[in-house]
Amino acid sequence: YVANYYRQAREIPDSNFLYMDPAASDYAAFAEANLDGLFGTLANSGIEDHIDYIIIPPGAPFFISANGYVTDNCVAVHRFALSSAYTMAFLKDDLLNGPVSSQWVNGYSTLNDTLAVAFDSSVAWFGGEPSDNAGARRYFIGAMLGYDGNLGNTIDDTINMIDRSVAADGTRPAGTFYFMDNQNDPDRNVRRVQYSSTVEDIGLFGGEAETILGVLPDGKNDCAGIMTGFANADIEGGNFTVLPGAFCDHLTSWAATFDNNHQTKLSRWIVKGASGSVGAVEEPCNYQGKFPRANTHLHYFKGAALGEAYFRNARFVPFQMLLYGDPLTRAFTYIPTVEVFGAPAEPVSGEIQLLPFPSTDNPQAQVTELDVFIDGLVFQSYDSIAPVVIDTTELADGYHDLRIVVYDNSALRSAGRWRDGLVVNNAGRSASISPDVNTGDLNTAFTFTVSSAGGNVQEMHLVQNGRVVAATDSDSGQFTIFGQTFGAGPVQVQAEAVFDDGMIVRSEPIDLDIAFVTGTPSGQAPVSFSYTKHVLNDQPFVVELPATFDDDLSTANFNIVSAPSQATIHTGATGGYRILVPDAGANGTDELIFNVSTPSGVSADAIVTIIYDSTGLPGDLNGDGCVDQSDLGILLASYQVDGGGDVDGDGDTDQSDLGILLANYEVGC
């Protein structure tokens, strides 16, 4: 529910969704499987060049066990916060080959610098700057939207937090940052020494900040942010008001240790009205470098996103620290706007031109760059504001998500966007979808009629957030899918037609509204679906196992009947997804056969046909970097027999594949 809601609220592209269990039994399993799933998905989706945040919805555990990876002279480290396990994704080898120090400096952090700098996961950081130093490292910013277990937040709490965070973006609320000097608790008041310089700097940059004695800012109704330290306090009942978009935290041992009933939890800040907080998932000791520094609020006030401001001021790598709430909140950012003229209202063909007119209210910056994103991928980049020319013959027919993102020339590179749908018709192909109803609940059976036109179709899919939900090998048909398959909340689905030359044509999306309500299961056995999936042959990948049923999800078993012959399935997963690693030189086609069982019955076996696409030379079927006699032999052995020599990605081996191979013969040799 929360993931669907957040997608709509933040307008997240379908390509940016990853369906898999976000946690694992321990860090070793996480590093082996989950990070394969993450990095493999980024590579297979083509989005690894611009993903900075990994955001986890409620439903996941808040930590993973991590014994022996980090040394600490105060208290042994036994846990990593789940959000930080993703923050540290690029540090996997360091951790597995460790141990490393609990005081390992976060390369993106800066100790006393007032400069707020845009975070970028694609570069390595050292000393707060992009660097090629041997000690420089790459990071993501990991965050958990909410925890719905014991002492966490309700789903409504999290939904309300998302709403007010989105609404706060760019509002630059008139408020005061309060730094609490709790002199009665010196162990938790260690950040007091940082306050004066931050209060002064916020004032120099035009904001309001104040250090006051006490635990909570009693009587203050303009709290733009709060930094304090205490073990227990009545945050919810306190006589103060937290403004939308605020970051609030309290330094203590167990603020995010939800399986420990002692001490006030960071979840109470969310109930009080904050958009984000940070806390430890086990006893961290009161190292100042483990907790957010006071300059978190300075950098946030200067326009950094909430997650960016925190991570810039997390002096040490945040092993045990859980970033909680909406890290994309930008309450104090001057968000650029852009109007676009020339956007077509009808299907287009050939070349089109769009005229972007950006602006910003930031008196110290100008909008100077833009990117064009199509279906979540960077399609074009401009280092100046200029007419955008799109050759639609480079796109498949059908619907595309079109975005123009503009950036100002400040150190934060603040971004704003324009978004619209683009329907292309160069080849006369189309896909369509029609639901019988648009509203229901988790037990509602939604029936979709899908069809295609304009050529020979291999498969039709029903897709949601980039994943296949149902499929048929016909050019039209009907799918009946229970609401539970999509999840509750605002949902968008599309029909997807896969033509025999490889072109994938999508319909315009349709909206569903699925209530977070369950009823009595129908007693129908699960229905599973066969489909074809293209993957890179040198990257891990996640395979969805599409099936629909209305028995409780916790009662379902997704059973692997037959594993692929050219890939290894990571162990541990039991739900509707599997993480696989292709063998070296995997090529052609492969099969994974599965079924699904619930108390109401067992589905028929379904087949996921896997097609391995080479990331190197077209025709290099054995992956050795050279198109030669060996590759020709592989192709001829499969010619008009199977997909073992498939070069063009259509699933078979024919004259087209032979032509491509011969055109590249001896290239790379």
Image: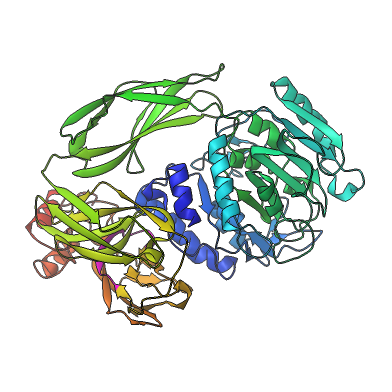
Work out whether 355 lies above or below 228: above
Q: Is residue 534 magenta?
A: yes
- How is the model colour-coded? rainbow
Task: Read off the magenta span.
Answer: 528-542
Residue located farthest toward the right when viewing the structure as drawn = 184
Looking at this view, name the residue that lies furthest to the top. Answer: 363
Q: How many marks?
A: 0
Tell me the residue at 68%/54% (across/down). 267
Can you tell which quarter of the image residue 540 is in?
bottom left
The foreground one among 162 and 133 is 162
Is there any visible trace of residue 241 in the rendered image?
Answer: yes
Give the x, y percent position of residue 200.
78, 25
* Relative horizontal placement of residue 117, taking residue 644 as reference (left or right): right
Q: Is residue 3 left or right of residue 467?
A: right
For the residue pair 653 and 545, the one nearer the viewer reads as 545
Query: Relative to 4, is 228 above or below?
Result: above
User: As rendered, which of 650 and 81 lies closer to the eye?
Assistant: 81
Q: Position of residue 117 (x, y in %)?
A: 59, 32
Q: Residue at 20% across / 36% down in the picture?
A: 392
Q: Is residue 444 magenta?
A: no
Q: Nearer the viewer, residue 12 or 46?
A: 12
Residue 395 in the image, given as x and y percentages of width and height? 22, 41
Compared across the picture, whether 46 is left or right of 645 comes to right
Left-right relation of 276 to 336: right
Relative height, residue 419 to residue 530 (above, below)? above
Residue appearing at x 36%, y 76% in the figure: 522
Residue 610 showing in the rendered view: no
Q: Magenta stretch mostly in which secondary structure?
A: strand
Horizontal and vertical percent for residue 293? Answer: 73, 40
Q: Name the residue: 44% across, 25% down.
A: 337
Q: Quadrant of residue 533?
A: bottom left
Task: Identify whether 7 is placed above or below 34.
Answer: above
